[in-house]
Image (spheres, coloured by chain):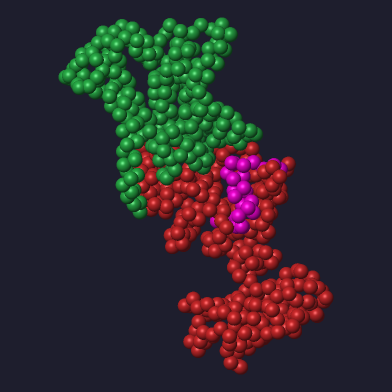
Amino acid sequence: MSSRPPKSLLTYAVLYLIFLYAPVILLPLFAFNDSAIIALPLSGFTFHWFGLLWDTKALHEALYNSLLIAVVTAIGSTTLGIFAARAAARYEFPGKRGIVGFIMVPLVLPEIIVGVALIVVLIQLGLSLSAWTVIIGHVLICTPFSIAILQSAFNNMDRSLEEASMDLGESKIGTFFRVILPLVTPGIISSLLISFTISLDEFIIAFFLTGTDVTLPVYIWGQLRFPARLPAIMALGFLMVSLSFFLLLTAEYFRRRANRLTGNHTRSDNGIFQ
Amino acid sequence: MKTPQKINDQIIAIEGVKKNFGDVTALDGVSLNIREGEFFSLLGPSGCGKTTLLRMISGFDSPSIGSVYIGGSDMTNVPPNERPTNMVFQSYAIFPHLNVAENVGYGLKKQKLPNDEINRRVEEALALVDLEGFGARESHALSGGQRQRVALARALIMKPKVLLLDEPLSALDKKLRETMQSELRKLQRTVGITFVLVTHDQEEALTMSDRIAVMFDGKIAQLDTPEGLYKRPKTKRVASFIGVMNFIPAKVVASTKTKLSLEVEFLGKINVTASNKIKPGDKITVGIRPEMLTILYGETDKADNVFSGMIVSASYYGDMTYYEVELKNTDINVMVSMRNTSGRPVLLTGTTARVGWGCESITVFDG
């Protein structure tokens, strides 16, 4: 039986949550505020700023770039993640721990370092900066997340399920499609959603590698110079935060489903969210 | 490698199989034949190689040296999906994303059979394991016993030549395990398929099998019927693995064609029925089962050999009482099991008792 936490701890937790989320709550507040100035008191309710977003052509281009980059990044990092996670779960080879650890390093590497390093390498290679160079950077930082998610899906899978399938006459490829894939699909969806979200929100690497194909965060950064556009940015920010929340919650739902399907009822480690 | 002589009732032939995992020798020269339609058990402690041998029959492991024949053909390097064997896994390996009917019909679907035939055979297979009407049930909603039945149905629907069972009862509680033991035996008679069971539980092997191969350290120590193993164990290790056996070190004093006269340290002479090639002067060990020893009540009870001792513990089981008796002037303790009948009250710890046994109830081991 779990007991109730002491009052002081509860107060601390509430304060902590306010500190975390108060700035974010300001977004919807000013996104719907009928005033060009970001200040209290609020002066009225409006959808005007959202309408303004609708009319801004440059924004649509940035949105298109961001979505393209996010979709390709999600597919790329998830595919790489599937290979790595399957190999790590299934095979024993010398230096396995080291290799897997090495793949995970970008998780803690400062993005600005990754960004600078990549721009130096890409320019040396003679590549021009575009959406595709951003994709390279984003795949690099998203792959560790994909591996972390997929590894728990693959690791939790009982090896004898594959053997049972082979025993019942199914081929190796058939077993992959009839047993392994269905069992790790929730993990794959979760990985796609999380890498999509990370890519969509990522600023530093995009800022370095984007060239002329600006992404949404880079566009927002550019707009911050114009105070008059700030409420519209608030509206855009509100939409992006809502979308991210929705995607992350969906991803978490699928991650838990993956754990449940593969017969793991209690453990929820290896995930990004505990 | 020569083809094994085709004996008409032999379904599996293992010939000189060795298996190494790195430095570890899992199987060290195993040869054995399994007959068509029999319930065969591989019995041994964990790490004895019994599971490796089963996985070699199923095709999940291949021998380092040696051959595996199933139904007369060499299957040594045939993958599991092309073998006429099916397996019930220790964890049952029920596909969690499929319901009961989809699990049972999994192998048939691969064979591209028409749907109504699959459905009909799934129903038949479920009926065979007493799970009629469970087809639509989700697999995570099944109890341990039901999961095992699904695993059985899923394997039997393939009509294998051999059904392999890897410790199928170890995950069940005692009561359910006993029920499933007799059900498995009945099921085997119904379907008439050869069953090969791997178990570490000697009682399970004894009650279910036609024949048992007892394995130690990657080798077959003895292959016999349950009765043969119990009554005529070849080594002390087999004897103490199958049931309980009392061991008494002895020296041969004299032997005739039929009788051996043995000198037991501190105890004096005992007489046993002779087995072959034991000469006077040999050091041997005699083995005797607890139920072959008797506590003699009063002067009228007689036996070929009688020794006195003191009861050091008595465990009452209702129908039986198990005594531990320390034989007089020795440090030998023997286990005696006595049926509780009227006129033979349960004796208390600390009382002296006379222990008797007959000549023919003793097994003689070398060394």
Q: Is residue B310 left or right of residue B344?
A: right
Q: Output the letter for the chain in red.
A: B
The green-tinted chain is A
Tell which of B254 and A145 is nearer to you: A145
Magenta residues?
A: B37-65
Is residue B225 at all visible to an observer of this figure? Answer: yes
Task: Point out the residue furthest to the bottom here.
Answer: B299
Image quadrant holding the N terminus of chain A, namely bottom left
**Residue B140: image x %, image y %?**
38, 45
Q: Is residue B337 left or right of residue B2?
A: left
Q: Residue at x 61, y 70 (%)?
A: B244
Q: Is residue A82 above or below residue A223?
A: below
Q: Nearer the viewer, residue B363 or B93?
A: B93
Q: Can residue B137 be seen by looking at this rendering? A: no
For the point 38% across and 33% down, which residue is it? A252
Left or right: residue B110 versus residue B54 is: left
Q: Is B51 in the magenta?
A: yes
